[in-house]
Image (cartoon, helix red, strand yellow):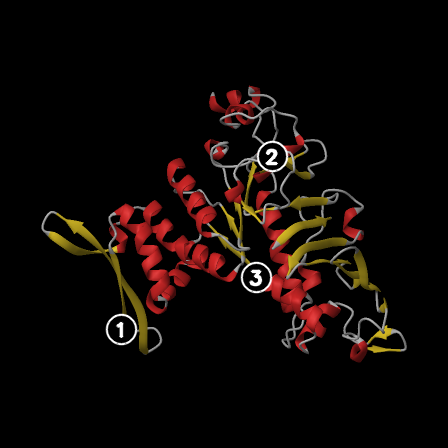
Amino acid sequence: MLLSFSFSNFASFKSVQTFSMLASEKNVEHPENLIAGKVLKSSLIYGANASGKTNFVDAFYDFRDIMLDSTSSEEKEPQISQTSPFLLDDESSDEPTQFEIVFQENAVTYRYGLAFNEFEILEEWLYTKTVRETEVFFREKQKIIYKKSRFTELDSFIENDELTIDKTIPVVSVAALSSKEICRTIINFVKKVRIISGINERGFKAITYKLFEEDEQFRSWALSILKNFNIHNLNIEHIKEESSHIRSKVTRLKVEVVKKTKDGFDDFPISFESEGTRKVLYLLGPLYDSIISNNLLIIDEFDSKFHTLLTKEILKIFHQFSNKESQLIAVVQDSCLMDSSLLRPDQIWFVDKDQLTNESQLYSLIEYKIKKKESYSSDYLEGQYGAIPLFSSYTEIDELMKG
């Protein structure tokens, strides 16, 4: 499970930002929202348009791509060269970008990170902790320091105290290919990070359809939820059709929902359902996969097309069924979700952009000394926590509207 993720000099973020899933000891409410009473099951990210919320999600994307795709045999631009540093000053383009992830697996805490520019990895490090934190290795460019008596997973990649792998590739990624135990643990956790967009449904509805066809347990679970939308079954048919463009047969899916009518049950094309209902259906697959596989699911624009009450119900479903180590991070806009009957203050995060430097900043509601309220929405909309769109002057807008 994720404990924290830190990054710097990335997109609209310049200074080091740390996002934490560790529960605050000051709060005791909603124990059902915690894993083992110490780690958050979910967090919501708020912020104005263009504040950097999607860049926050992209930081996970880029870190994941660097770790998983750098060892691809395809000849292409190195993954580290495809990461954009902070570009709104003259210094940051020459400074390294840094990522660090802290997670727990089988009662061991791992802290792994790397710093790089567009040409090479400058530093890479790994620490583990059971009782106290211990350095496993530290890399500085192609030189690497580790205790050979304790850690042998990198031996085959080193000659004369220098790495023999490409300077653009994390050594953990290479070692994991050889089934090295500790390095494989790092990569396996990164693989558990699943990222989807709540607007582009094509990216995740196929997961739900596949599960409906192949997993009877998922089908029963999903239908128990969908009955609240008068959906009692889902029929999926693979139809082969001739294609005039490629002169061969292509397969399309015909999907129908079974609904209860006054005369019994009848089938209707899924296109007859509202966009919100369809999105609920499509999200069930990734949510179930996260719960069953103990994945970290990150959803951008999570609440788009949803009524507030519907979004709350989906969060309740996740908290109820996520009884192991699955986690959810969701980027949202709906301030009505800042409901103390649903979430703890440490589950609410903000991304704000400094109007002078254009730097995005990431911070938690728990950083404010506030008394518990039924909802933090009104205070948020009044600007008490920042991260909302504010116009410094309406004069120019007024003049433009007058023509």
Question: Where in the figure is residue 79, as x and y percent of width and height?
Answer: 67, 64
Q: Which residue is disc 2 drawn over?
A: 27
Marks 2 and 3, how far apart in space? 28 Å
Image spot of residue 109 (x, y percent): 70, 57
Amino acid type at mark 3: Lys
In this rendering, would 221 be left or right of 42? left
3 or 1: tag closer to the N-terminus: 3
Q: CA distance from mark 3 to mark 1?
A: 36 Å
For image coordinates 30% across by 51% down, the residue present is 226
**Rendering coords of residue 358 (x, y %):** 68, 37
As shown in the figure, which amino acid type bears the numbered disc 2?
A: Asn
Cα separation between marks 2 and 1 = 58 Å
Residue at (71% x, 47% y) in the render:
86
Estimate the x, y position of residue 390 in percent, counting from the top left: 58, 26
Classify mark 2: residues with Cα within 10 Å, few (<14), some (14-19) or many (20+).
Answer: few
The residue indicated by pointer 1 is: 241
